[in-house]
Amino acid sequence: MNKIFLFILGSSLFLFTGCETNKVTHITSIFIEAPASASQSMQRTVTLPVSGISIPVMTKELTLAEDLLNTEVVEIGEPGLRLVCLLVQVDRKAAKNIMEVSRHAKGKSFVLVVNDQAVGIMPISEPVVDGNLFFTVEQKGKTNKQAALDLSKDLNSSILAIRKLQE
């Protein structure tokens, strides 16, 4: 489904914008870690690129690329134990869905997937009630901070291109 959406979105972008610089290059989705009770046909395994952590996720994404509003690089946690994260903000509809899912998924994780590659993880310790998700991101050859900065720039560019397509 993601590949079909990527093809249609990319084709539409080409037809409507020609050679404009605003191109959708990063199709982003958020998935939930699959519960142990999920059948094999209802899950797939994704692997983070640096840590090599493999996570079984549900095959149906919680959010689509058009649900994203913005990303920013932020530091969270106690002073002295700060962690650089990618803040992903989603629209109201997606936020409502994430809130509902996160209520029942304590101890599981959200997984950020870009162009069918897992790039970030967010453990769920409490329900997410505001549509703000804080992902620890990974990219080979980059520090956590540089990976977050580069990804934020690329995602925001694609978010803007998607908004222009929707207008």
Image (cartoon, grey):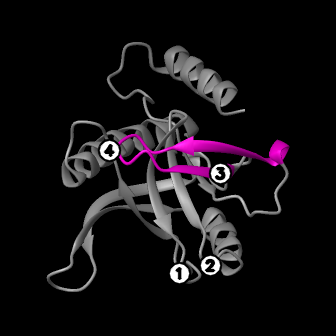
Which stretch appears magenta? Answer: 40-57
> Which element carries disc 2, helix, strand or loop?
loop
Cα–Cα span, label 3 and label 1: 18 Å
- In the rendered view, would you say 51 is above or below 10? below
Check disc 4 and report the residue beneath it: 151
Residue at the image position 52 percent from the left and 78 percent from the top: 130
Residue 120 coordinates in the image, percent (x, y):
43, 52
Label 4 crowding class (10 Å Cα cut-off): few <14, some 14-19, many 20+? many
Asked if residue 42 is among those painted magenta in the image, a careful observer would answer: yes
Dot label at residue 106: 2
Q: Earlier in the sequence, mark 4 or mark 1?
A: 1
Of residues 144 and 14, the one drawn nearer to the viewer in this rendering = 144
Residue at the image position 62 percent from the left and 21 percent from the top: 7
Dot label at residue 56: 3
Residue 80 coordinates in the image, percent (x, y):
14, 82
Residue 20 coordinates in the image, percent (x, y):
35, 20
Cα–Cα span, label 4 and label 1: 24 Å
Query: Contact (CB < 8 A) between labels 3 and 1?
Result: no
